[in-house]
Amino acid sequence: MSKPSGVTINLLDKQYQIACPDEEREDLTLSARYLDQQMRNIKASGKVVGLDRIAIMAALNISHELLKLSREHKASLEQAQDPVDCASSAKLCEKIEEALYELRQLKIS
């Protein structure tokens, strides 16, 4: 893993400098775009006011999506008959858990 370098992301027209290893820059950029779109959707609904509240609602919605996918994935693992499918599904489940952990660690300041 390389040393972290700075990546500038935009969320609701505000720029944030985030430290990120070079090999994860593309994923971080895609994640930021997805988060920005979710935040814009929440802002456009007019039901939530304030950047902090919008960010929290977006984080909760994204976390809910990930947990739902994780549960669906675990359910499909339980139904899987092929050991090869189970191994690859377990790896995917681990990656989802890692992504959830990293999402929790990401601090927007």
Image: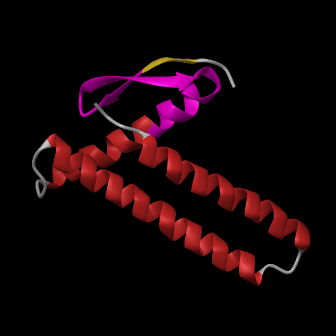
Residue 13 at x, y percent in the picture: 24, 27
Give the side of residue 23 with respect to residue 80, left or right. left
Residue 108 at x, y percent in the picture: 32, 35
From the viewer's perspective, is residue 99 above or below residue 7?
below
Give the side of residue 26 with respect to residue 29, left or right. right
Q: Residue at x 73, y 75 (%)?
A: 77
Q: Residue at x 59, y 57 (%)?
A: 97
Q: Is residue 27 magenta?
A: yes
Q: Is residue 106 magenta?
A: no
Residue 54 at x, y percent in the picture: 21, 48
Give the side of residue 77 with respect to residue 107, left or right. right
Q: Residue at x 73, y 81 (%)?
A: 78
Q: Residue at x 57, y 67 (%)?
A: 70
From the viewer's perspective, is residue 29 above or below residue 79?
above
Residue 9 at x, y percent in the picture: 38, 26
User: Count of labels shown?
Assistant: 0
Q: Which residues are magenta?
A: 8-31
